[in-house]
Image (cartoon, helix red, strand yellow):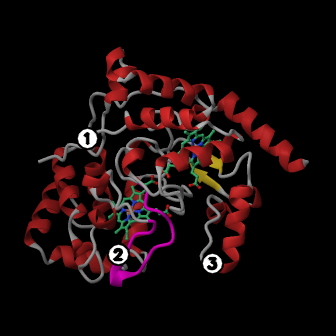
Amino acid sequence: MLKNLIIILNLIILNLYGSQHITPIPKEIKFNKQKALLGKKLYFDTVLSKDNSVSCASCHNLERGGVDNLQYSYGVEGQEGDVNTPTVLNAIYNFRQMWDGRAKDLAHQIQFPLTNPKEMGNSFDNIIKALEKDTSYNKAFNEIYKNGITKENIGDALEEFQKTLVTPSAFDDYLRGDENALTPNQKKGYELFQKKGCVSCHNGINLGGGLYARFGLIDNSITDNLENKIYENDNPHFGLYNVTKNDFDKYYFKVPTLRNVALTAPYLHDGRVKTLKEAIGSIAKAQLGLDLTDEEIFLIEEFLKSLNGKVTIIQ
Ligand code: HEC
Ligand code: HEC
């Protein structure tokens, strides 16, 4: 009873306070080119990992929608991670970073992969020493930053590069008034996306990335399954609860962006779902209690494909 009441309250609050607006990617993106080029060099460089084997790009492949299309990525020494890798494309527009939002921005985010023993397994002392040995990094950092190579400056440069990783798409043209930018099926899919209530969580520039929502808000059989899995799993993912330790926050995850979602299979924070159709069907059930028809799923998928965009890597 209480649980149902909480769920209904949640939906009301979402509808009252949640912005239902979807806005296009701004036409002009401000960034510092010199910093972004340094960030780009760091992004593709395995020197950041403990044993020189992994770069940011290993898990966040920019040719593959900003992910590696694996359920879990592999870090140093071939270790498998325990949460699905989200895309870096358009991440600049997320209100916080990581599934549980524990990073407040992109500069803050980098310390997690760099020091996670299962990802890059390194320490900032080591990274700074390695970069100081390299004359071209030394030169670049010292030209830009008064205090040279520091943890904060590495974060700043990587953030600046990631600001350039935005992917305007046909949908942005449509939002700006080009009626022909979407196919008739995509327009029907967009209408369903709004009418069925997807937009109450997936909104803003990123169609997501702007709030936390409970995974299994209406149909929590999906999280009951998680709960069962938890007993076999040493490293369960409780979402926002991991940060706040507040019981109420269990299974609250940052709503993921749907930009480029057709390219970023598998889906959900544990990568359990292989296809986009399946993700649309099971999320509609879990978050809205809806059983979508095959036709509706098809149309929504067509719409989501209009969110595929191309990233231009700065030179
Ligand atoms: C071994 C694979 C791996 C490597 C290497 C890696 N990441 Fe990630 N990245 C992940 C995973 C997994 C997550 C999700 C972690 C979580 O939410 O707890 C993530 C999350 C992120 C996010 C947050 C996106 C969002 O929507 O919340 C950003 C941004 C990001 N990584 C950028 C980077 C950068 C920059 C580097 C290099 C310094 C890097 N990553 C290195 C696997 C990796
Ligand atoms: C109440 C908020 C809410 C509503 C409503 C909602 N979603 Fe989501 N959506 C989420 C959350 C939270 C996740 C991530 C869940 C997880 O992985 O634990 C998600 C994940 C997804 C994913 C997987 C994305 C990825 O990268 O793994 C897709 C696709 C998706 N939603 C589409 C939809 C569609 C289509 C609708 C409408 C039928 C919808 N969502 C309605 C909150 C919502």
Vertical side of 108 occupied by 167: above or below: above
Mark 1 sits near ligand 2, with its Cβ under 8 Å away: no
At x 61%, y 25%, the residue is 195
Q: Residues within 10 Å of mark 1 (few under 14, many from 20)?
A: some
Instruction: Say above or below: 129 vs 30.
Output: below
Q: Which residue is mark 2?
A: 120
Q: Nearer the viewer, residue 110 or 229?
A: 229
Residue 73, magenta (yes or no): yes
**Residue interval drawn in magenta:** 71-86
Q: Is residue 52 left or right of residue 199?
A: left
Q: Secondary structure at mark 3?
A: loop
Disc with the residue nearer the chain's start (2 vs 3): 2
The residue under the point 17% across, 75% down is 132
In front of the other: 151 or 53: 53
Circle 2: element type: loop
Residue 299 is at least partly visible in this image: yes
Sequence-first tag of 3 and 1: 3
Asked if the beta carbon under badge 3 is closer than 8 A to the nearest atom of ligand 2, the reply is no
Q: Which residue is mark 1?
A: 310
Left/right of residue 208 with respect to residue 306 in the rendered view? right
- Answer left or right for 125 relative to 281: left
Residue labelled with disc 3: 233
Q: Position of residue 259 (x, y in %)?
A: 40, 41
Using the numbered discs, state the Cα–Cα distance from disc 1 to disc 2 in whole angstroms: 27 Å
Front residue of 315/125: it is 315
